[in-house]
């Protein structure tokens, strides 16, 4: 399959960085995109951080990504809600990345009869806030979650993440959330709109078959699986879909820019 690639989407963890360190080839990949003036976005399901936070974290690892080129599940969620119900209200469980995105999208953050309950990532899930979310959903608020990831990494091992807490709320309310982040291709389509790109001429680089690659395929993008993250080469054949290309790392893509 040969396409003219004019714009790029890339996952962050496992593709550009691993445990706070740049993966070899990642700084050169981003530099090549910027030097050629190609539209690109770095995507992450993590809703904790604002683009400014993420830019600073990437800069420490030696990767220079401008704020405008970072697209989080929090930003995608805020854009989705703005499109669905402009000027709405939400009760939010999450950190600054999510609350800031919703505020900038024109949303009122409230625990009094909100239009939506929005669940995102946070370092400390509060029993009180989860109980509040359950009661608001039971009272008619619509249930939105930034992403379905059940666990998140830490230096001591996995932590419960948005998907796991969403399952708790679903069990208590009988209501499933609408997940905006990967693998929902909605996140990719909003990213394409952000950089005014067309799926036919855009590539997605990811390290997970079950999120990055399947969502990229469903959004009509060319897909590149790198083997520096979650999915191993021997795992690819287990899935009922395939990436268009499998490469060892992001370094292999620098010559294609």
Image (tube, rainbow, N blue to C red):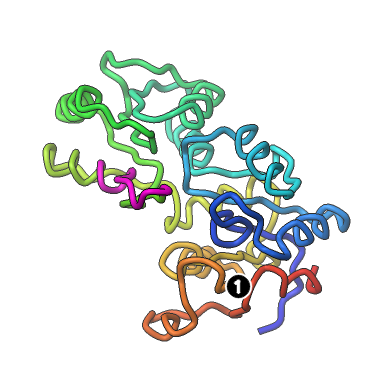
- Viewer-closest of 1 and 129: 129
Left or right of residue 8, residue 188 in this image: left
What is the crowding at mark 1: few (fewer than 14 residues within 10 Å), some, or many (at least 20)? many
Residue 251 quadrant: bottom right
Residue at x 59%, y 67% (from the top left corner): 221
- Viewer-closest of 238 and 196: 238
- Within the magenta stretch, is there residue 105? no
Where residue 192 appears, x then y in whole percent?
A: 63, 52
Position of 42 relative to 93 (above/below): below
| Residue wearing tag 1 | 224
Position of 160 relative to 242 (above/below): above
Position of 178 relative to 224 (above/below): above
Left or right of residue 177, residue 81 in this image: right
Outermost residue, right side: 35
Residue range corresponding to the magenta coloring: 154-165
Where residue 93 appears, x then y in whole percent?
A: 34, 29
- Within the magenta stretch, is there residue 156? yes
Where residue 31 appears, x then y in whole percent?
A: 81, 55
Where residue 96 appears, x then y in whole percent?
A: 49, 26
Q: The N terminus appears in which quarter of the rendering? A: bottom right
């Amino acid at each position: 399959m040969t396409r003219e690639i004019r714009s790029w989407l890339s996952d962050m963890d496992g593709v550009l960085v691993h445990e706070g360190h740049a993966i070899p080839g990642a700084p050169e990949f981003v530099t090549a995109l910027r030097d050629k003036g190609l539209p690109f976005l770095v995507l992450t399901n993590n809703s904790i951080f604002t683009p400014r936070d993420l830019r600073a974290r990437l800069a420490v690892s030696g990767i220079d990504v401008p704020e405008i080129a970072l697209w989080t599940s929090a930003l995608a969620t805020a854009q989705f809600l703005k499109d669905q119900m402009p000027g709405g209200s939400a009760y939010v469980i999450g950190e600054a990345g999510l609350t800031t995105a919703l505020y900038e999208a024109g949303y009122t953050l409230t625990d009094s009869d909100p239009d939506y309950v929005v669940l995102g990532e946070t370092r400390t899930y509060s029993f009180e806030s989860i109980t509040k979310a359950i009661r608001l959903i039971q009272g008619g608020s619509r249930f939105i979650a930034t992403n379905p990831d059940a666990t998140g990494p830490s230096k001591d091992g996995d932590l419960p993440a948005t998907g796991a807490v969403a399952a708790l709320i679903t069990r208590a309310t009988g209501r499933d959330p609408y997940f905006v982040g990967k693998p929902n291709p909605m996140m990719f389509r909003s990213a394409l709109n952000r950089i005014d790109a067309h799926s036919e001429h855009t590539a997605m680089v990811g390290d997970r078959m079950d999120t990055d690659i399947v969502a990229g395929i469903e959004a009509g993008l060319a897909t590149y699986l790198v083997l520096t993250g979650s999915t191993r080469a021997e795992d690819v054949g287990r899935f009922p879909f395939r990436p268009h290309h499998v490469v060892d790392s992001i370094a292999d893509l620098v010559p294609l820019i």
